[in-house]
Amino acid sequence: MKRLFFNMNNDLNQIRIFSKVAKLQNFTRAAEILGIEKSTVSSKVSQLESRLGIRLLQRTTRSVNLTEAGMQYLSYCEQALETLQIGDDFISGLKKEPRGNLRVMLPQNMADYIISSVIIPFLTKYPKVNLELIQSNNKIDIIKSNFDIAIRATAEDIEDSSLIYRKIYQSERILIASPEFIKQHGISKNLRELATHPCISFVNEQQGSECFDTNTEKLKFKYRFSVSSMNCVKQALLASLGFAIVPKSMVKKELAAGLLKEINNEIKLKPNVLYLIYPSRSGQPAKLKAFVDTMRQWGENN
């Protein structure tokens, strides 16, 4: 009987209709409650019996009774339908209340930058969400790697993709150095002149030290120090080891305190843009919607 019940060709409508008829012991009443024609109810039950190869109900003009096989089969049907209802309720809960595990990929060092403004408030507001953050600048397939969402920083054009790319933040990139470095090397008139001076680079995991480009030219600078840590880049800048090109938002405090200065604000660089990347706009669980909204609000306030 179990083998018959869990056959891959099971028609759930047949099972639901049979279950309703069996409980009510009345085809007409079952049709009224289900909101379908009595003929449909009778047809579905007959199809189910035909597929199983056994009679489940004994019918007369006055009564409907379960056979012995029908009584046993009904118990399996009720268990299965109850399990399906639990599953439906679970999915409904995911859509209404943020809960469960959320796996996020974000750029190297970004967690340090948003821990107090985004991560802690998000986890405090949604206590049923478990957040896993993986920091990397690698471009990976977020679906195959089992990420719910990715945050990607780029100054490049977005490639064609079936994924959703949602721009949430744009930061100006600037040329900066310590006052001591500028005093020693002067203010360069252009990138080619600047390329003769020692540079500090934030290392890209896939491509190594990045090339910096304006709207008209691309240059690879003379790197004295390359590291995959923005905090280390800032420390090297403060130590006058070289100049760097960084998002202005990452050095606001140092600029305000006069510890770092722009070298030449006449040289314009492509901005650094943050995108949220996720599979689809529709059918999102509440946990993902909540995180998207949190990041969007953060972008608007910064």
Image (spheres, grey):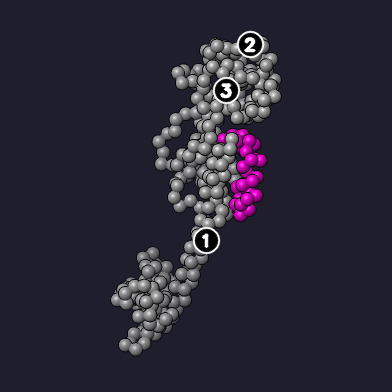
Q: Earlier in the sequence, mark 3 or mark 2?
A: 3
Given this view, does label 1 or label 3 mark the residue nearer the observer?
3
Which quarter shows the N terminus? bottom left
Return the x and y of residue 30 as percentages of the image width and height. Answer: 38, 78
**Residue 291, numbered circle:** none
Residue 136 visible in the current orientation: no
Is 124 a magenta residue?
yes
Residue at the limit of the structure toward the front, as seen here: 301
**Residue 90, numbered circle:** 1
User: SS class of the residue under badge 1?
Assistant: helix
135 and 297: which is toward the camera: 297
User: Left or right of 40: which side holds 235?
Assistant: right
Name the residue beneath numbered marker 3.
174
Amino acid type at circle 2 is His
What segment carries the magenta color? Answer: 105-131
C-alpha span from label 3 to label 2 = 17 Å
C-alpha span from label 1 to label 2 = 64 Å
Residue 137 visible in the current orientation: yes
C-alpha span from label 1 to label 3 = 49 Å
Verify CB contact (< 8 Å) between mark 1 and mark 2: no
Amino acid type at circle 1 is Phe
